[in-house]
Amino acid sequence: MFVACSTLCFGKYPLERALQIIRELEFAKIDVAIHEQGPHLKPSEVAADVNRCAQRIRIGTCLCPAAFSVEIHADNEEGYTQHFRAVCRLARLSTVPVISIPAAPSGSNLDVEAERLGKLVQLAEADGVILTVDTRVGTLTELPAGAVELCQRVPGLGLTLDPSHYIIGPNQNKSHDQVFPYVRHCRLRDTGRGPEQFQVRVGQGELEYGRVVNQLLRSHYDRGLTVDIRDVPDSPFVMEPEVRKLKYLLESLV
């Protein structure tokens, strides 16, 4: 296993400055956010010029991209597919093995979503990329059983585990051990149980980092653990010390 840093840890800065800070914190790998409504790369920008986006990720930083977090907003299926193909090509050019997208909203038809994801898995595999869906509140993966069922219905689909959503969401911090065999990437921050405690200082929440790592090891997981403390407006703490603290903690466990 290795420890990476999400570019969203420094979302108030342009991408190039965020990458510089991540390098100064002595990370070797990055988890790049490609969100249409995000602060850094956008899927529409990738579709417009894949090669330029590949240069922006790598130029002058000596950081290795390890994963992409992708959120596409398109008017129709054709537009979504175009942007998705471009992101997969960027992943291939950047030697990124895994990308994650959100699953359909909770309450969606499971058969329809399985069919959609099956097509996307095939597109990703054509570029040698593993497709995962995030474990996220408000989507079909907000409960562990739903996440596992999606993976069982769609061969080749994996999960990007974000245990914060299982702590604060409808799972109510119950066991989510059943998802670990399907995990292909992992993003971490500390989280409390209160409605306003999705993100708290490292060590003040409910997340048992050692247990997460041990469960991943039991499932023969050998991929990344991403520090994913979000740089939100009016954050009650300074980002750099918290990111550094979680980096050291995770490195001590792997």
Image (cartoon, helix red, strand yellow):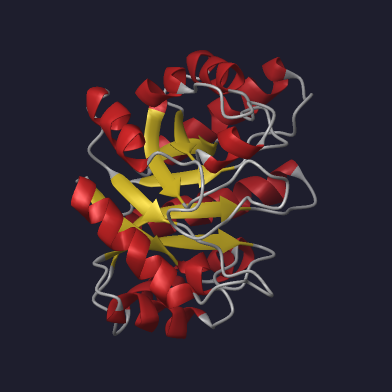
How many marks can you see?
0
Q: Quadrant of residue 51?
A: bottom left
| Any part of residue 65 in sight | no
Locate the N terminus by quadrant.
Answer: top left
Q: Quadrant of residue 26?
A: bottom left
Vertical arrangement, residue 201 with respect to residue 142, above or below: below
Q: Nearer the viewer, residue 162 or 74?
A: 162
Q: Position of residue 50 (x, y in %)?
A: 47, 67
Q: Position of residue 243 (x, y in %)?
A: 40, 67
Vertical arrangement, residue 234 with respect to residue 195, above or below: below
Q: Position of residue 221 (x, y in %)?
A: 26, 32
Vertical arrangement, residue 126 with respect to residue 179, above or below: below
Q: Nearer the viewer, residue 106 or 119?
A: 106
- Identified at 49% across, 53% down, the residue is 204
- Identified at 56% across, 15% down, the residue is 149
- Identified at 30% across, 76% down, the residue is 25
| Any part of residue 232 in sight | yes
Q: Position of residue 97 (x, y in %)?
A: 32, 46
Question: Which residue lies most toward the front here?
Answer: 204
Q: Nearer the viewer, residue 90 or 65?
A: 65
